[in-house]
Amino acid sequence: MTLQSVDQAVDLEAVARAAETQVLLAAGTFGTALRERPEFVRLREAGAALGTDHAAQEAIEAFNRCQSDLRLEMRLRTLNALQQAELERIQTAMLAFPTVAEYVAAQTAFEEICRETATLVSSEIGIDFAANCRSGGCCG
């Protein structure tokens, strides 16, 4: 190893740190912009309203219990007509709460922004950004 190769390694490390800093700053700017989007504000507000609606929370818990009880049948696609009707009845009752309906609508709108963002980032970096953010495979 020569003094010149050490200097080159130091220079390369400095360039890498500068690039990493730029990425982190851009991510921070992006996060701030996303947080200010009307879709995100709506989602936060809907979540707060839903969190204080105890009757809606009970309806959500009832739906989750029913869904959990039928998870195996749903996975195997063996729900009978009565089970399917009961699940749909409980889901309809849950969605009848205005706070639940608003939260679902707000979440759907925010998810669309996230999909658009992932598409934009993917086109900029040349790989499927969202797929590479999922856990699983060898790295997650």
Image (cartoon, helix red, strand yellow):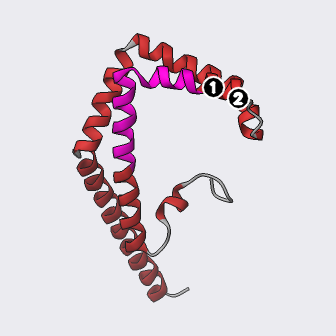
- Stretch in magenta: 88-111
Q: Is residue 4 magenta?
A: no
Looking at the image, which residue is at 70% across and 29% down?
Answer: 81
Please report contact status of discs 2 and 1: CB closer than 8 Å, yes or no: yes
User: Which circle marks residue 85 in the picture?
Assistant: 1
Amino acid beneath label 2: Ala
**Badge 2: few (under 14), some or many (20 or more) residues near its Cα, within 10 Å?**
few
The residue that disc 2 covers is: 81
Of 6 and 41, nearer the camera is 41
Amino acid beneath label 1: Ala
Whether residue 121 is situated above or below residue 95 in the rendered picture: below
Looking at the image, which residue is at 28% across and 55% down?
Answer: 30
Of 121 and 80, nearer the camera is 80
In this rendering, would 92 be left or right of 67? left
Secondary element type, mark 1: helix
Where residue 97 appears, as percent x and y from the top left, is 39, 20
Specify the principal SS of the magenta part. Answer: helix
Where residue 56 appears, as percent x and y from the top left, is 43, 16
Looking at the image, which residue is at 73% across and 39% down?
Answer: 75
**Badge 1: few (under 14), some or many (20 or more) residues near its Cα, within 10 Å?**
few
Looking at the image, which residue is at 46% across and 79% down?
Answer: 9
In this rendering, would 94 be left or right of 140? left
Quadrant of res 62? top right
